[in-house]
Amino acid sequence: MSYTVVIPARYASTRLPGKPLADIAGKPMIEHVYDRACESHASRVIVATDDPRIEAACRPFGAEVVMTSADHASGTDRLEEVARLMNFGPDERVVNVQGDEPLMPPELIDQVAANLEAHPDAAIATLCERISVVGQVFNPNVVKVVFDHRGMAHYFSRAPIPWARDAWQGESAQKQIPEGVGYYRHIGIYGYRVSLLQSFVTWPPAPTEITESLEQLRALYNGARIHVEEACQVPPSGVDTQQDLERLRQYMAAKQKEDLNP
């Protein structure tokens, strides 16, 4: 199974500037992400950045780095530039691993790549997990996905989908997840065919994408198929805030201590 992992890494994060370089257990965050990607079966791992400080931080651990434009609106645009600069063919597969996911299980990276290979009619592959807490269904920060029996996505939304019309009426509304109804949270790891990336950057933002603020809806709006599968394991949360970073540092410190004193 041949595919490439690309790790988009921006310095100018709004909530946590410079987070790819944040120290975690003696290593910059981007090195932890790179290490997880190298534990997958990817044939190549590339860090894509627009900042020379991140490029310099990657040199000591030998990562391949591609410098990209600072003007990209999204990580998908950055991936397309990498594919173009590296002359990837339209049928090659690229897995996007976010630069703030230092605990991303390599098994999930392999899973999306394998699913893309197994479903030639899908242009994108991604993952989800079953929701068991009703509050998450109604939380707009939790993106839900509905898909068919083959795993092809119908829609992604911040709203509760599917809407349990009969169960969520009157006093029982929104108190529990109805039996026999599956609700799934989207996990934001993607595998792409390069041909999709080439098309994606030419499409204007879709009305649904603008409304929901969900970039993957642009692909659905333009007829691209997205394969969704329940993740073989649930990934830990990424790092979005200083609080997330401190929790991760505490976790890694405890893990190091446990490894030294089994």
Image: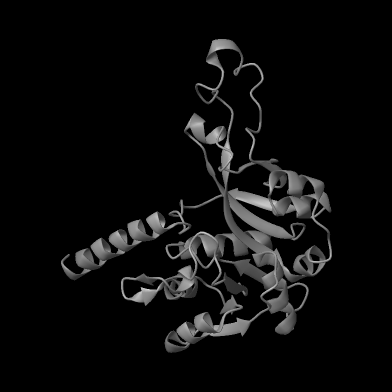
Q: Residue at x 56, y 69 (%)?
A: 12
Where the N terminus falls, by quadrant? Answer: bottom right
Q: Residue 45, percent across and down?
A: 55, 78
Q: Residue at x 29, y 60 (%)?
A: 250
Q: Residue 247, percent across and down?
A: 34, 56
Q: Residue at x 38, y 55 (%)?
A: 243
Taking depth in this image into account, of 177 and 237 the one nearest to the observer is 237
- Outermost residue, top direction? 170
Taking depth in this image into account, of 244 and 79 the one nearest to the observer is 244
Picture quarter containing residue 81? bottom right
**Left or right, 94 with reference to 45:** right
Taking depth in this image into account, of 230 and 137 the one nearest to the observer is 137
**Left or right, 65 with reference to 106:** right
- How many numbered callouts? 0
Q: Residue 225, percent across and down?
A: 76, 53
**Left or right, 141 with reference to 247:** right
- In the rendered view, would you say 198 is above or below 141? below
Taking depth in this image into account, of 214 and 181 the one nearest to the observer is 214
- Outermost residue, left direction? 261
Picture quarter containing residue 85? bottom right
- In the rendered view, would you say 154 is above or below 124? above
**Tell me, what colour scheme is on the image?**
one colour
Where the C terminus falls, by quadrant? Answer: bottom left
Q: Residue 238, percent across and down?
A: 47, 58
